[in-house]
Structure formats: structure tokens, C-alpha cells
Image: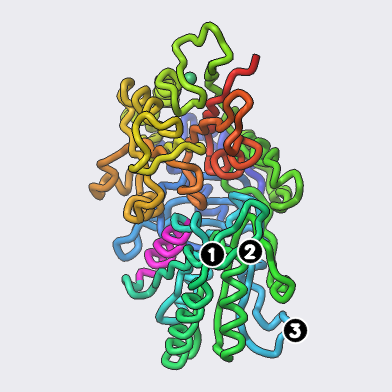
Amino acid sequence: MADQTRLDAWWRASLERNEGGDPAMDTVTYTQLVARFSIPLTTVELFLSKEPRLQLWTQGHLVHAVGMEHGRPMSCIALFPQQFQVLEETPDDDDDDDDDDVRILWGPTGTSKSVVLIIKGYFLLRKGCGTVFVLQSSRDGAAAAYLVGHQVRETAGHGAGSVQFVNMAGVGKKDRSGQYHWIEEGKKKVQAWVEELCQHAQTHGRVHILADEAECDVIAEIYRALKQRHVRFTLWAAGVKLDVPADMERYVRKLTQPLRSPPAVVREVEQADDMKDGTVPAYTRPPVSAPCDGPPVLTVGHYDGNYSDRQGHEGGWPWQCARCGELVADMLRDLRVGCDDNAPHGQGGLTYSDVFVLGAMFCDTDTPYGHPMSPAPFIRGLESRGVPTRKVDRNDTAAVRQLAEMTSGPTQRAAGRGRDEAVTVANEDTVWGLERPVVVYLDSESGDISIGGADITGRLRSVSRSTAQVIWVKNVRT
Ligand SMILES: [Zn+2]
């Protein structure tokens, strides 16, 4: 079963022998059979938050739905050796004489860092630890924390108390040069939480912490405090840009194989400044080649104020432009987003909730309609063509949480969810850690002004969220 080509040849030959074959053996059944028999030994079942595309790269890379388990839709994913090694390695491999289990997963976007954290949390709960703490240590880490916590809890099926969220986002802040500054009460807040952890450890023997999109200064503070108090602990953190302190360097494990985005998207992400200068580790080739390059990036041209004939465009930045909204709406229609008739093989097509519209614009509710950073004109353009939108304020905890836990796809739709399908319009920092099949990136450069720009933040923060299609709204340059 290792060789898909040989299998296909066998399948075609047997069809010819049977003169049309077994009528019960349709394409879907065949594909699912192949999926079933192609599963390598290292697979893990996870709660299904998104209907997976039935992916058959070759042996060793597979995501498919395996149906319901105790009322929860589950998916099966095959692990690559790189992920598997991180999970399998015993904590004793350190030269430490204690049994603390510490890992720092470092790698570019879409390399399964969150998935590994989720599997780790699931293993911990399955082994009988009563509670996993999911720590948000940076302001932009809210969505990632909700995603990891939700997936761990749903995969394990252990009820609400099995995962506890802890928010340490406000204890300090990075300045432009990347230097971390604690606020006055910041360290005290961390120390108070460590105190709680010590109490927890007295009753339960050990504390378990997962931290996605981690802020290393906060993680190191907690790590050192727990060490000092001789608390036994698990601390698994992950991130894209990490300043790992010297005393924690031995815990770093790199995850660098692109698993989220197809090659066409990965090539765009690689051109981000932070990837070119090594701030973020470079991608490495996965052990199997991608089945296809992925759909090419689509572009929409925004004619800014440098043009005398603006062809209906307005404003400096694309989000100030209703015309750009209309053009994107037309492209979404061409991609059959939100159409009921677009489902091949009953797999379910793209819904409006499969789309992120991202950029440097301000999506907070207190941004006035006429503010230059308000995306109101772009949204007006989308809605004038019948595309429903949902603007997410980064301070709206409930909305961000819903975005991270959002379920869609046929299984969920059948269960009555996903009724409020809408395209999500958000600042790119709000969705750090999440992914969607379609990402519309509104370029954040206008003439001579850049307020982030594609190479500075957009490629990493926005474009990398896409699992399939990128629509890039760019300023047309003279
Ligand atoms: Zn425009």
C-alpha cells in the first residue's frame, strides 16, 4: 500500500477485469478504503473541530474523519517522525537529575506545534492527571490558548474541569526591539499563580502546563519559580518567535516541516523578514512530497491615490475601499464559497466561516466608522455582494474564543451548528494560532507608508493562516 501509483494501477486493472467493477465500490468508498489501509502505526485520534479534507499524500501523511466517539466527532491524523520523536522522547533524556518534563517547541507557522501540544495534553489526561493548565502568556496568544484547551478537553472527553485557562497576558510587554518589560505588578501576579500551583501539587502530586504562542520571559519566570519550590511539573511551550534563555535552551525542539499550508502558500510565508533573517527558523522539507502545489495566490489590485483613474477604488489602504470588497466578494463566489451546490462526493464545500479577512486594520468596536484604520468600507463592499461578515474585536474574549472553537463542515452543520456562517474580518494579531482554508490578506502598505506591511508582519501573521487559498489585495504600483 506504500505506492499510490501502483495501487491506482491495480484498481484500474481490476475495474477492467470486472467490466465496470462492483457497483457498490464508488470513488468515495475506494478512497476511504485506501485511507484505512494506508494508516501507518503512528496515528492519533483528535477531536474534530473542522471537517478534514480527506488527504492522501502518500503513506505517512493522512488526516481523515473516523466518525463519532462518545458523541464527539473525531479525526485521525498520522504523525510525521519529527512530531512523533518530540512526543516519544522521555524527559529523562535530559542530564537533569529531576523528572521535570519541559519542552519548548520552536518553528515557523503551520508546523504542527499546536497539534503536538494538544496530543501532549490529551496523553496527560488519559494517563490520569486530573487537570491541565493552559497558559496564555502573550497578548496575541488568546486564540491559540482557547484552541489548544478546547481540543485537549474535547479529545479527552473529560469534562469542563479537566482544562483550566490561565491568562498572564498583561504581566508585561515586548517593545519594538523585542525587549520584554514587566509591568509593576507583573512578576507578583506570576508568583501568586506559582503559589496556587504549589498548593495544587501538594494535593495532586504534579502540575501540568501547556503554553502556545509563548512569551519566553513569562515561561522562564514560571519555570525557575517552580524549580526553586521543588514542585514536580510538566511545562510544554510553543512559539514562532522565541527568545529562549540560556538555562532553558536544552529543552528546545524544532518543528520545521510545513504541514498546514500547501507549497504555493509556504513560498510566500518564507519571504517574511523574520524568516529571511533567521528570527524564525527556516522550513525544512517534509518526508513526503506534497501531492500538488496548491492553488496559486490570487491577487486583487487596489488603485490608491497615486492614480488619476482609480477605477472606482477609494482610500489609501485596501480596507478603506468598498470596490476591493466587491472584487473579493466576486472571487469568493468564483471559489463557490457559501454555495450549497459545491460539494463533491458529499464532502461539504467551503462556507463563509472558512474565510478570514486579515490585515493591520483596527477591528475594535471603538474604532469610529470614518477612522482611516476602520475596515467599514471594505465590509460594505463585501456585504453589497451578499457576503455575510463578522468583525472580531480583539478585546472581545467571547468572540475570539468562539473563533478558536468554531466548528463547521457537514457533521457540525447536521448537528445544528454553523448556522451563523460569516466571513471573519479581524486584525491579523487576533487570529494568531488559527487557520482557515481561505485567507484574504489586505496589504498594509499604502504608497510610501507602511504600518506593518507584508514582509514585516503580513506574510507570517496573515498569509500563513491559509490551508489552501490566499487572496492578496495589493496596492498596484506605478
Ligand atoms: Zn480598492
Q: Residue at x 52, y 60 (%)?
A: 138
Please, is residue 407 above or below residue 193 in the view? above
Q: Under tag 1, what secondary structure?
A: strand
Looking at marks 3 and 2 on the same chain, the residue that comes earlier in the sequence is marked by 3
Residue type at mark 3 is: Asp
Residue under label 1, please give it. 172
First to last magenta residue range: 144-157
Image coordinates for residue 13, horizontal then vertical, percent: 59, 35
Image coordinates for residue 227, horizontal then vertical, percent: 61, 86
Q: Nearer the viewer, mark 2 or mark 1?
A: 1
Q: Nearer the viewer, mark 3 or mark 1?
A: 1
Q: Is residue 411 left or right of residue 148?
A: left
Marks 3 and 1, Cα distance to the nearest angstrom? 32 Å
- The residue sitting at the top extreme is 309
Marks 2 and 1, Cα distance to the nearest angstrom? 22 Å
Q: How is the image coloured?
A: rainbow
Looking at marks 3 and 1 on the same chain, the residue that comes earlier in the sequence is marked by 3
